[in-house]
Amino acid sequence: MSNSQDESLISAIKTLHDRYSFILEKCQQWNKQSPILGLYRYTNSLLAEKHFIEKLLQEPTLIKKEHVQSTNLGYLEPVYEALESIECKNEVMKIIGVPLPNQDMWLSQVALIKRKSIKVDIIAQNGLVWVKVIARNAKAFRHEVMGLEQKEEDNDYCSDDDDDDDDIKEPSASDFDSLPIFNKARDYLMAARAYHVHYHTPVVVFAFMRIRPQEDVFVQRIMDRLTEMGIIVHLQTPDNDLQGAYMPLLKGIDVTNLSTEKLNLDVSSIFALISELSHHPCSPDDISAIPIKVQAEREASVRCLPQLKRIVEGKELYMVQTAYDRLKSIIDIVGGPNEIARFQYLFRHSLGHPETPFDQDLWSMLPSLEVHVIQDAPSTEFFQLLEPPPQKSKLNNGRKIRTRFSEFHAIVFGSGHYYQMTTLTAIQWMEKALTDAGVLGTFIICHEPRSLAEQKMVKK
């Protein structure tokens, strides 16, 4: 190899190194501004490539043409470009289990992923947008379309140096719909419907970062079919940014405060709304019960009511009968005078006193609220969580969900699921327990816990 060729290869390797370094620096900046879940998966790939290149630069005689041609930057850079164009990016390279059509067999999240999974390159808009980045150019995509469902990091990219193969025969009409890319699209759409976000189905975007509009007739035919299926197809051009492809579909949705218009409240949420500690914080030294001392310390640094106000204001509030019965029995014993007064105002219609006036001093920063009591209507799948799994397991005492999950929880959270309401709770472990147990979708908002504290507060 001539000296000029050696210098050219070294220069190309240095350029790759600079590009990896630049992208890694940008990732660090993004994470400082707003942490992105799973970003380490992406940066680990970048670091591995960067370290390999640094070893080559230490021994330039080892550099070969293949090191430039086979770099994973062809995939990693389009992912960066997609991330750069998205303002609200939440997670990167998330593995999601694909449910079976009309699945009636229980599977844990781990088993679901093991059976069949997809990789979502970017999750944006607090879960409402899923982006799959495809880095092939039109020529390579046309040639490789039959292998799209293989290992994505390696196969979603082919360089511009791929051999043109105009002799590839297009599939017949009967075979067209069975192309792997359409099977992949069906998996994404099926998973998106299952993993709803407060009963909104995420928008699925296939971002073709190296293909231009109308560049290839056959490729365009594939994209038209993807669009017909419900996939948002994005082709990256200077005048066509990624956010513009999906933002019109989110019109009218407040992605910063996602929930349903009707909220299902857990007992713990009512406690937080009416607790004297929430409305009139005090020093931990003024609390006689140790567990509530901890909450008083927390309240001093993180106020509970501003968070709750943002969630409940302007919403219709509901509580199922079983939860109400338990709440009332606790209030009657543990509630202090102000806490009882707040409870009676929240449930004024259920208690037969609809004329009860609103006292702003009693409620401090909260507006006038009312909670309606409705019938229990738990989804059967929540009670199934209490049953033994198909295969014997030593986990969760032989149940499908952790031991602390009770019939009461199945009624409260299962009813919210049946009514398709977001359920508000202060139970910190609930969302992860349901997710691990294979309950799909996001339908819980967890907030700071606050107990009834008035009778435990030292009077001055």
Image (cartoon, helix red, strand yellow):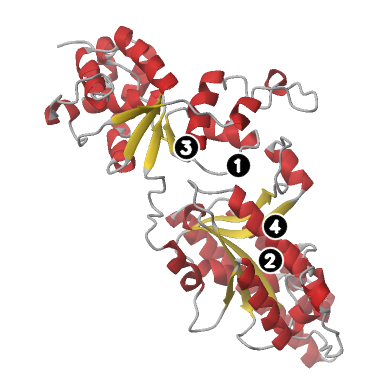
Residue 82 lies, in percent from the top left, at: 56, 69
- Which residue in the protein does label 1 denote? 440
Query: Is the residue under label 1 in contact with that under label 3 (CB below 8 Å)?
Result: no
The CA distance from mark 1 to mark 2 is 37 Å
Residue 169 lies, in percent from the top left, at: 86, 84
Sequence-first tag of 3 and 1: 3
Quadrant the N terminus occupies: bottom right
**Residue depicted at 81% across the width and 69% down the height:** 147
User: Mark 3 or mark 2, which is nearer to you?
Assistant: 3
Residue 394 lies, in percent from the top left, at: 75, 21
- Which residue in the protein does label 2 denote? 50
User: Mark 3 or mark 1, which is nearer to you?
Assistant: 3
Label 2, secondary structure: give it.
Answer: helix
| Mark number, residue 419 | 3
Give the residue type at disc 2.
Answer: Lys
Give the residue type at disc 3.
Answer: Tyr
